[in-house]
Image (cartoon, grey):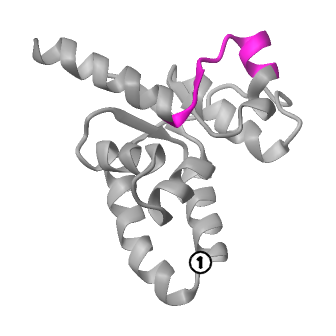
Amino acid sequence: MIRAVIDTNVVFEGLTTRGNASAIIIEAWLQNQFTACVTNAVAKEYVATLSNKLSTSRWQTIGVVLQALLTRAQYVDTYFSWRPSSPDPADDMIIDAAMNANALLITNNNKDFLQAKTKLGLNILTPSTFIEYLAHQLEEENG
């Protein structure tokens, strides 16, 4: 099964906007069509970002969905850190999660992850590219 770390920007967009690639990823995550990998730090970042950016009433609704997502996630220990690997220190925890999980990284923000892609070989996909890849893999599995 495909393993992926979903960047916070994709989770936020997927939970707050309908009909885009990020929303499709959230649906695929809810349906266990891939293994979403998180560390405790990444899960806390999801909660902090969403709870800070959304109104209280919207957070109460979306927070329930986020909890459902996190119960379906595979929690990964961070045995090794590759910091600094990004110009944005907050992105280093996402890189560490992806590298320790041996997973794809799904993000809308490729530029902050280019150094990790080049130096570490991190596999980075945009949400739309990931949807295409996931559909192809599911098609192959179902024959």
The N terminus appears in which quarter of the rendering?
A: top left
Stretch in magenta: 115-127
Picture quadrant of residue 28: top left
Which residue is rendered at x = 59% and y = 75% of the image?
Answer: 51
x then y, percent, for residue 5: 52, 35
Query: Is residue 41 depicted above or below 2 in this figure?
Result: below
Which residue is rendered at x = 32% and y = 32% of the image?
Answer: 34
Query: Is residue 84 depicted above or below 21 in this figure?
Result: above
Residue 12 part of the magenta segment: no
Considering depth in this image, is 107 or 86 the residue closer to the camera? 107
Which residue is rendered at x = 70% and y = 40% of the image?
Answer: 93
Which residue is rendered at x = 34% and y = 25% of the image?
Answer: 134
Q: Secondary structure at mark 1?
A: loop
Mark 1 neighbour density, 10 Å: few (under 14) some (14–19) many (20 or more) = some
Picture quadrant of residue 130: top left
x then y, percent, for residue 8: 60, 50
x then y, percent, for residue 33: 26, 35
Residue 118 part of the magenta segment: yes
- Residue located beneath label 1 in the image: 54
